[in-house]
Image (spheres, grey):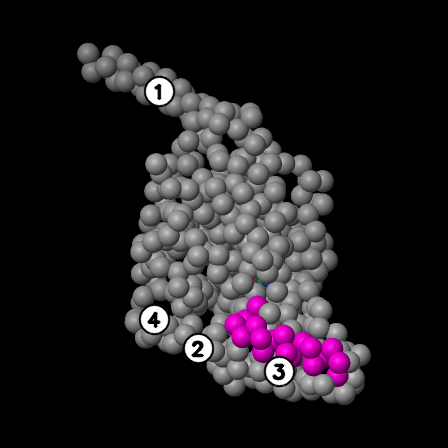
Amino acid sequence: MERKRILTGDRPTGKLHLGHYVGSVRNRVRLQDEYDCFFIIADLHTLTTKPEKENIEALPDNVRSAVLDYLACGIDPAKSVIYLQSAVPEVAELALLFGNLVTVPRLSRIPSLKEMAQGAGIEEMPFGLLGYPILQTADILMPRAHLVPVGKDNVAHVELTREIARRFNFLYGETFPVPEVLVSDVGSLVGTDGGTKMSKSLDNAIYLSDDGKTVRKRVMSMFTDPKRVSADVPGTVEGNPVFVYHDVFNPDAAQVEDLKVRYRVGKVGDVEVKEKLVTALNAFLDPIRERRAKYESVSGLADEIVYDGTMRMREEARATLNLALKAMGLSAVWNRIARKAEDVKKKRDKAVNQ
Ligand code: ATP
Ligand code: MG
């Protein structure tokens, strides 16, 4: 039996951070043996908020950086297809077809799109940004994926994908699987500023490639319990980003529990809690950093991986688009016209030659 498929990916807007790791990358690494995986580097999606030339010029380096982060985290390109969205033009055609299966009010109700516009300082919703989840639907259905591991902010997009897949199948016959979403147990990692989401654009991130000194600096300036003015004041652990990170990244559960107990009664300073977090984070990041450095030293490695993956994905995309066009009866439109035209031409040529 054929294995089930995964599609997920990232926009190449820069380096990956801890939020990307716990929200999606960790699940990819865990599932890559069980599923056929397709990881998209979604550069067309960056245009929805950043269409300017200088952002496009930054894409090749950002793509390489994403691939190195993947490899460093343990994604194996021999098992998974890593590809560049803009080099697979079929995705635009599929998105155009899907755009007819969804209404503008339905798209307007998706909260993440408004948040993205706000975050990018955009006042009026661009057509492309409103259509972000349609393009994402084309990404997901292109390899006919069954499972989509993403962070919480993307759940509403996968819900739309499911609706579009069902609608397509209803109108044109069973063509696409209706994919399941997989949200990790840390669906949205808080930022170092206590904001709801660690994010590049909010400058509240710790990157997988940050060195030890940078991690220390970021942790030491982290937001904690604002009501706690000194170490002897009882503090709140719940929702406190320093403890959220301890829970996720510190494998020493007894140490974390001890810190929490003392924090609650005002028997430990923020500095000690943070020092221990720096140690835990650096221990977590060290092997990732080492692998990243090793892969980075191989000239052209990331480029070759994306090249091979994209070539593979192009075949996949052609096959899926053909399936969709056939199901819709759209390929038959041209086929009939073309057959008739060729027929007429052939007959005319024959008559002239006689
Ligand atoms: P950023 O705002 O930092 O650029 P992003 O939301 O643009 O991040 P994407 O490239 O759009 O990141 O998403 C990549 C994947 O990582 C998505 O599945 C997204 O849900 C997930 N993700 C991003 N940030 C976080 C976070 N703070 N916590 C959990 N998952 C996250
Ligand atoms: Mg991003």
Callout 3, which amino acid? Lys
The circle drawn on residue 286 is 2
Say left or right for 43 vs 293: right
**Residue behind mark 3:** 274
| Residue 271 at x, y percent in the picture | 65, 87
**Residue behind mark 4:** 295
Between the C-alphas of marks 2 and 3, the distance is: 18 Å
Between the C-alphas of marks 2 and 1, the distance is: 63 Å
Callout 2, which amino acid? Asp
**Residue behind mark 1:** 339
Is there CB contact under 8 Å for labels 1 and 4? no
CA neighbours of label 1 inside 10 A, class few (<14), some (14 to 19), many (20+): few
Q: Which sits earlier in the primary sequence, circle 1 or circle 4?
A: 4
| Residue 318 at x, y percent in the picture | 38, 39
Callout 4, which amino acid? Tyr
Q: CB at mark 2 closer than 8 A to ligand 1?
A: no
Looking at the image, which residue is at 51% across and 48% down? 148
Between the C-alphas of marks 3 and 1, the distance is: 72 Å
CA neighbours of label 3 inside 10 A, class few (<14), some (14 to 19), many (20+): many
Q: Which sits earlier in the primary sequence, circle 2 or circle 1?
A: 2
Which numbered mark, 3 or 4, is in the foreground of this view? 3
Q: Which sits earlier in the primary sequence, circle 4 or circle 2?
A: 2
Is there CB contact under 8 Å for labels 3 and 4? no
Range covered by the magenta-colored residues: 248-266
| Residue 43 at x, y percent in the picture | 49, 57
Q: Which sits earlier in the primary sequence, circle 2 or circle 3?
A: 3
Secondary structure beneath label 3 = helix
Looking at the image, which residue is at 38% across and 42% down? 3
143 vs 205: above or below: above
